[in-house]
Image (spheres, rainbow, N blue to C red):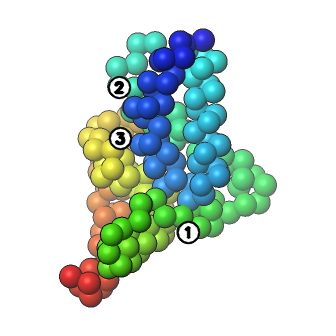
């Protein structure tokens, strides 16, 4: 097992980003917490997983992405609709200081929930994690062009959905 300080360091450095990414994918806070816990239990039980890993966060994001997809597939097998889960309202953003900013954050969260999961994952990884398309493509096991096009289509949908609200509050 890895030393407690190694697990604590991993958690301190990456848990917040992993939580935000998972919440954006699952749109369900209890599932997000469970998946995050499963990840750290797995790392504690299999410390060799991180041996030779150059980019810890990217590797951990890939692990939680795969865990989230597995969860959604299990649910689908139990006749739970994957897209219904993705569209459940969950706000991935902290409360804002002003009512206008809070309204925009809520609308953004809802608009993200309306994106297909594949686009939502790429948009999150690009905007909130600052990953390159190359890193996103590797992490999600898609081509570079696929990652870039999912991002472009996702942003176009977000712009279209949020433009009226932005124009109203600016």
Badge 3 element: helix
The residues bearing labels 2 and 3 have C-alpha atoms spaced at a distance of 12 Å
For residue 129, above or below residue 90: above
Residue 57 place in picture, x, y as percent: 39, 32
Residue 103 place in picture, x, y as percent: 38, 77
The quadrant of the image that shows the N terminus is top right
| Mark nearer the viewer, 2 or 1 | 1
Badge 2 element: loop
The residues bearing labels 2 and 1 have C-alpha atoms spaced at a distance of 32 Å
Badge 1 element: loop
> Is residue 146 in view from this perspective?
no
Which residue in the rendered view is the most extreme toward the right?
Answer: 78
Q: Tag on residue 118?
A: none
Which residue in the rendered view is the most extreme toward the left?
Answer: 170
State the residue position of label 2. 55
For residue 28, above or below residue 73: below
């Amino acid at each position: 097992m890895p030393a407690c300080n190694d697990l604590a360091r991993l958690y301190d450095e990456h848990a917040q980003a992993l939580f935000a990414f998972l919440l954006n994918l699952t749109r369900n806070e209890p599932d997000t917490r469970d998946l995050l816990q499963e990840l750290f239990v797995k790392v504690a039980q299999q410390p060799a997983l991180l041996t030779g890993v150059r980019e810890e966060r990217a590797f951990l994001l890939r692990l939680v992405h795969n865990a989230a997809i597995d969860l959604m597939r299990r649910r689908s097998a139990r006749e739970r609709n994957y897209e219904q889960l993705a569209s459940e309202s969950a706000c991935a953003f902290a409360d804002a200081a002003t009512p206008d900013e809070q309204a925009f954050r809520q609308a953004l969260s809802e608009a993200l929930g309306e994106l297909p999961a594949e686009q939502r994952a790429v948009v999150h990884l690009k905007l909130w994690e600052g990953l390159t398309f190359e890193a996103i493509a590797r992490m999600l096991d898609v081509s570079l062009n696929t990652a870039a096009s999912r991002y472009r289509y996702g942003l176009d949908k977000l712009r279209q959905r949020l433009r009226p609200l932005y124009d109203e509050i600016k």
